[in-house]
Image (spheres, grey):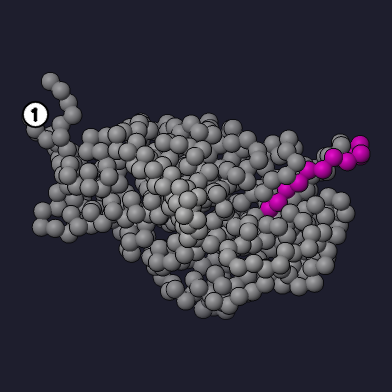
Amino acid sequence: MVEQSDRARLLDWEEIPPAPPAPGPPPQPGPPPGPGAPTQAAPRPGRGPHVTAVVGDGGPARSRVDHHHHPVPGWDQLGVSVKDRWEEKDQIVAVFVVTFDTRSGNMVEWSLPQDMNLDGVEFKSIASGSHRITSDFIYFRKGCYFGLACFANMPVESELERGARMKSVGILSPSYTLLYRYMQFLENQVRLQLRCPGQYSPLEAFYEDKKAVLPPVANGQVTTCPTWSVTNISRCMHPEMKITHPAGCMSQFIRFFGEQIMVLWKFALLRKRILIFSPPPVGVVCYRVYCCCCLANVSLLGVGVSVPELRPFFYVNIADITALETELSYVACTTEKIFEEKKELYDVYVDNQNVKTHRSDLQPLLRLNASDKEKYSKLSEQRQMLLYSQEVDGDCTSNEEDLFILFFMELNDRIFQILGEVAASSEPILTAEHMRAMGLDPQGDRSFLVDLLEVYGIDVMLVIDNPCCP
């Protein structure tokens, strides 16, 4: 891999000198490539799997999933070499400064390149309610680009500015995997902009050093966003994740939600539209978006190539309503309470630690069953064992992030491995024994498994004990 400097040339305006390079992962990592990578929205297949249930008199109920799905076009058209080219190069396509004007509201005061369409970034870069906090960072999406902005709020003795100066400095890239590299630079620059407005020289040098060289397409024009193969993403997902996730992100995420993490895991694996609400600061909530996407990681090749990817939208506001209306699957966060009323935009609504859904067919998934609690208990036990080995044996080869990520990846792999083996057998019938082998509750996870078979188009028969009592 070609190594490149994380600092732009000629950046002598930075207030804090860079630390000497140290081996190991960067000190301020950000979200990695989870189950979603920047792609165009996947069209809904013409006909999806159809589930029918046959209930005998006092006997078992059988649910049959008829496999009638069509591969989503464009998901596996490009090879690894194109993906690798994009990941190894700096990919900054725009840099900008957003300010809050007491008369005009949020506005872009400066940007490069000047012909870049930045409509809407002024509202994404300063989250609603940010006037109550002093600093924040925000991940967001702008079309097929991903953005990172650092916000700061500084008191000033100015009647014109009503006692406060608020600005945000941000960048856009076709991918969010490397945005974390520039967080410290953006933090320094937003502080500089607050104290010395109009000092754009460091940003100009940064853009000239990091601007993307987009690969041309057949007609000679420049493509703005590559469509990556889901199979190729899965092949190298964990190594990238290991070096780019924010330190402590996953462990904090799971400690925050506790056992409810198992509920989020099911919704993520089913590719539902998940919206997380929280008041500012929104940076830590953007990490929760990323962590939620990680719950659906699968390393088995070919799994999920024909279903909507779980796309991280990160921060959204009312300006994103039109975009969300067309999305089949996503995870996003917002600081605007009005989204709770727009139930057509989401399947699952997370208000801090409260996970809920307005869809009656998804209500059973909100209830934790014995298998859910057992899986969470195992996860907690593994974490305690890891912490003990680190303290007593000085084990520095493993960390909590790897443990959590691998726990859910192996759980998902086991489920799809067993489903694949049953589907390929001479008698494709799932039994209670199969469900237990997958770590699922034969009764409590029945609706979850039926939904899973339908979403992924797996053609098997599910033998279900009749839960009805005479």
- What element does badge 1 sit on? loop
Q: Quadrant of residue 425?
A: bottom left
- Report the front residue among 436 and 90: 436
The residue under the point 29% across, 34% down is 370
Residue 116 can be seen in this image: no
Residue that label 1 marks: 58
- Report the front residue among 169 and 119: 169
Q: Measuring from the top left, give residue 94's x and y in whole percent.
A: 69, 63
Q: Measuring from the top left, give residue 361's x and y in whole percent.
A: 33, 34
| Left or right: 332 in relation to 150 | left
The residue under the point 67% across, 68% down is 21
Instruction: Give, as a three-letter code, the residue at label 1.
Output: Gly
| Left or right: 342 in relation to 160 | left
Q: Is residue 151 magenta?
A: yes
Looking at the rendered image, the quarter that the N terminus falls into is bottom right
| Left or right: 301 in relation to 40 | left
State the extent of the magenta-drawn residues as a range.
Answer: 149-161
Q: Measuring from the top left, give residue 183's x and y in whole percent.
A: 68, 57
Tell which residue pokes out farthest to the top in this image. Answer: 470
Q: Is residue 8 magenta?
A: no
The residue under the point 12% across, 35% down is 60
Residue 164 can be seen in this image: yes
